[in-house]
Amino acid sequence: MTSMPDPSGERLLRILDNLQRRTLAGALEWTRGSRADAFIYSGKNASVVLQTQDRDGLPPYEVDLIDGDGAVALTWTTELNSEHAVEQQIIDVLTPLYQRIAAQYGPAAGVLDALERDLLDEG
């Protein structure tokens, strides 16, 4: 586990949990990043980049916190099978979050939309 921005990791967990809840509720928009497995939430004063460490769409995840000037303030990577309870909670939050974002904004989303339109037009 990369060092936490707060010693317990609780603050990062709260932020990621809020991101997950608001994303699953449809209240937040994400964009694709420079990698196929990277997604960006841009807030007013800071941003979050969520991607997978191995570029395979599966944990471990990498979270970059970006300040208002576009500089990476923190990069944090989860560890699989961590013995740290907070880290496991963070993985539990990131997994459904990443899955939703990837399904909605990932490269396959556009292809699926196009296929649905094509099949409706042919029907």
Image: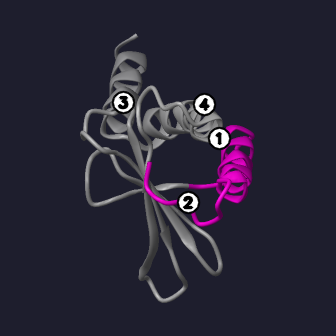
Q: Which residue is mark 4?
A: 92
Q: Identify the residue under disc 2.
A: 4
Residue in view at x 65 percent, y 53 percent: 9
Percent coordinates x, y for residue 78 in the rendering: 44, 43
Residue 14 falls within the magenta-colored stretch: yes
Please name whichever residue, 9 or 45, is drawn nearer the observer in this view of the structure: 9
Of pointers 2 and 4, the one earlier in the residue sequence? 2
Q: Which residue is mark 1?
A: 86
- Foreground residue among 49 and 4: 4
Element on which disc 1 rests = helix
Q: From what the image shows, is residue 11 above or below residue 65?
A: above
In the image, residue 108 lies at what x, y percent?
Answer: 32, 32
**Boundaries of the magenta span:** 1-29
Disc 3 element:
loop
Are the residues tagged 2 and 4 within 8 Å (C-beta)? no
Q: Are marks 1 and 2 in contact (CB under 8 Å)?
A: yes
- Could you say whether the residue bearing mark 2 is in a helix, strand or loop? loop
Earlier sequence position, callout 3 versus callout 2:
2
